[in-house]
C-alpha cells in the first residue's frame, strides 16, 4: 500500500464511497483500464482520506462523507485541487487510454450544470440500484498497492 497520501508520484487520487456498490464497480472499471498506472484510490472512510477531506473542506464523517467522487490533483502540494462530480469523471477519463479521453472531451461539451445534474440524479439512486456494502470491500491482491 502507498504509505502516504502525499507520495503519489504525480498520480491522481480518487476518493470514493467504499460502501457504495456503484462506486466500487466504478473503481474496478478504472483499475482494468488504467494501464499507465495514473490513478490511486482511497475510500472516503479511510483515515488518510478523512484527513485530506477535512483539509479540503469536505465532510469526512463516514456516515455522510463528501457525497460525491473526488479526484485530488497534486495532493499535499501547493497547487492541490479537488474536482468533484462530473468534473472528477472528466478528469479520470482523460487519464485512461483511447477512446476514453475523447469521451471526456464530449462530456465537457455539455454545460457543467447539466452534467452535474445527471451526476446528482445517479448519486441519489445509487444505493437503491447498485446496493450498499456493509464494509468497504478489500481490493484484489494485485491491486492493493494502488489503494491508500
Image (spheres, rainbow, N blue to C red):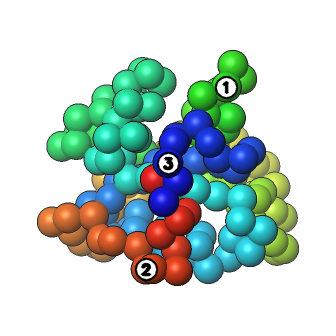
Residue displayed at 52% across by 53% down: 2
Label 2 crowding class (10 Å Cα cut-off): few <14, some 14-19, many 20+? few
Mark 1 vs mark 3, foreground winner is 3
Query: Residue 18, relative to residue 5: is it above or below?
Result: below
Identify the mark at residue 3; answer none if there is no mark. 3
Q: Which residue is mark 2?
A: 140
Q: Is residue 81 left or right of residue 117?
A: right
How much space separates mark 1 and mark 3, taking CA atoms?
Answer: 16 Å
For residue 29, which numbered disc appears in the image?
Answer: none
Quadrant hosting residue 37: bottom right
Q: How many marks?
A: 3
The residue at 52%/80% (across/down) is 142
On residue 77, the disc is 1
Mark 2 or mark 3: which is in front? 3
Q: Considering depth in this image, is 32 or 145 the residue closer to the camera?
A: 145
Crowd class of label 3 (few under 14; some 14 to 19; many from 20; radius 10 Å): few
Q: CB under 8 Å between callouts 1 and 2?
A: no
Residue 10 in the image: state x and y as whole percent.
Answer: 74, 45
Percent position of residue 111, x then y:
69, 41
Q: Secondary structure at mark 2?
A: loop
Determine contact: label 2, label 3, CB under 8 Å: no
Callout 3 secondary element: loop
Indicate which disc, 2 or 3, sits on the residue closer to the N terminus: 3
Give the residue at x 62% y 79%: 32
Give the percent coordinates (x, y) of residue 24: 40, 68
Compared to 60, does 95 lie above or below? below
- Of labels 1 and 2, earlier in sequence is 1
Mark closer to the chain start, 1 or 3: 3
**Disc 1 secondary structure class:** loop
Tell me, yes or no, if residue 45 can be seen here.
yes
Image quadrant of residue 131?
Answer: bottom left
Amino acid at each position: 500500500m502507498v504509505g502516504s497520501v502525499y507520495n503519489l508520484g504525480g498520480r491522481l487520487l480518487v476518493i470514493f464511497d467504499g460502501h457504495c456498490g456503484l462506486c466500487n464497480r466504478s473503481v474496478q472499471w478504472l483499475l482494468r483500464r488504467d494501464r499507465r498506472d495514473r490513478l490511486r484510490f482511497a475510500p472516503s472512510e479511510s483515515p488518510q482520506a478523512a484527513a485530506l477531506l477535512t483539509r479540503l473542506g469536505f465532510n469526512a464523517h463516514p456516515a455522510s462523507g463528501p457525497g460525491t467522487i473526488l479526484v485530488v490533483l497534486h495532493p499535499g502540494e501547493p497547487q492541490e485541487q479537488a474536482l468533484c462530480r462530473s468534473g472528477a469523471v472528466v478528469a479520470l477519463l482523460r487519464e485512461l487510454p483511447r477512446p476514453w479521453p475523447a469521451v471526456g472531451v464530449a462530456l465537457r461539451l455539455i454545460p457543467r450544470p447539466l452534467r452535474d445534474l445527471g451526476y446528482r440524479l445517479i448519486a441519489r439512486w445509487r444505493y437503491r440500484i447498485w446496493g450498499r456494502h456493509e464494509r468497504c470491500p478489500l481490493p484484489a491482491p494485485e491491486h492493493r498497492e494502488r489503494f491508500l
